Image (cartoon, helix red, strand yellow):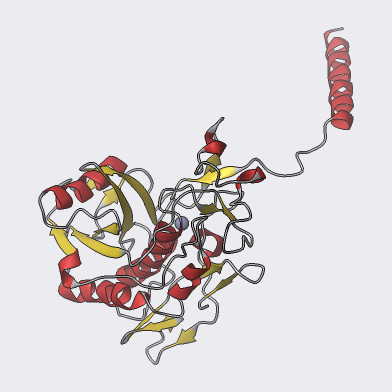
Amino acid sequence: MKAKLLTLVVLSLSLTVMTYAQVLRPDPEPPELKPTGKGWGVAVEKGAKSNGKPGGGGPGGGGGSSLPCGQYGIQYHGGPIMVGTPNAYYIWYGNWSDSQKSILEGLISNLGGSAYYNINTTYCDSNGNFVSNAIAYSSSNSTADNYSQGTSFGDAGVKAIVSDAITSGKLPKDSNGVYMVLTSPEVKETSGFCKLYCGWHTHGTIGGSDIKYAFIGNPSQQCPNGCQMYSGATPNGDAGVDGMASVIAHEFEEATADPALNAWYDRRGYENADKCAWTFGSVSTDSNGAHYNVVLGSRKYLIQRNWVNASGGYCSMSY
Ligand SMILES: [Zn+2]
């Protein structure tokens, strides 16, 4: 009796489901997501779609007809891009050797002006500006932090590190800068380094100014398989730092094309570099067995491709 009743219930339930299944159609498009700066999207909150510049967006949040560049597989949502020559700032957090620093200084000093970074010039805003193929970096654009937040901290700790560097006068307060907190191998970022991301970028108010900043951790101890491409021979002889070079390029491209997380991203909430994450195109092998795909200055690097917002849109190492 009980079993029969159950059968009946199950039967009527499945009938109900079947009926609904015929009425409801799958959503033809997945829900629209916005970027977190960490490489994945989150649902757009109610009312958040209209946070673009007034008058800047047509239906669907696009840039309207005034946009001086196309939207190829990635859409403009009305927010600012970084224009002119942005300054890159490095904060060496924890224990860094000079040879490690020179690998990443060689990267950022030669990224601007490269055919690789020229990809970012395919991004524009509705005021007629384009991201420029230029980055300013000099040795005075870096400072060291001797574990002011210990060896384990979350996103607020990253912001505090940037804030300390600015308010102490070690780095200038620069709303046209991108401050990159670079941590040594033992340092943990508890919001998900090595579990959810290898690095991230965002912006926030520091000293009354809108400051763009990023976190990039050294994965060599915590997740060599997650955030490095290789653990053996790498282009500059330091697998962890060579891995960071790729993530720095990725975050800097996003920070200039989508500094406030409301300019350039696709329906999944993927920003330009997210669309090409962990793809490298044509890879060469050095005499020592290290893999690389670009030469910047006097050094070789293996860095991720970026999304070209032109000609239909595609991942590339150059434009
Ligand atoms: Zn990203």
Q: Is residue 21 left or right of residue 54?
A: right
Query: Please, is residue 175 above or below residue 312 in the view?
Result: above
Quarter-of-image position of residue 146: bottom left
Between 114 and 190, the residue placed more toward the observer is 114
Query: Please, is residue 118 above or below residue 65 in the view?
Result: below
Where does residue 157 sit, x and y in percent of width and height? Answer: 24, 43
Query: Please, is residue 315 above or below residue 36 in the view?
Result: below
Where does residue 21 sit, x and y in percent of width and height? Answer: 85, 31
- Report if residue 74 is visible in the image: yes
Between 127 and 313, the residue placed more toward the observer is 127
Where does residue 7 sit, x and y in percent of width and height? Answer: 87, 17
Identified at 22% across, 76% down, the residue is 102
Identified at 40% across, 57% down, the residue is 255
- Report if residue 151 is visible in the image: no
Q: Is residue 57 left or right of residue 244?
A: right
Q: In this view, does 281 lie to the left or right of 93?
A: right
Q: Residue furthest bottom?
A: 287
Identified at 20% across, 72% down, the residue is 138
Query: Please, is residue 23 above or below residue 245 in the view?
Result: above
Where does residue 149 sit, x and y in percent of width and height? Answer: 18, 45
Number of residue marks: 0
- Location of the N terminus by quadrant is top right
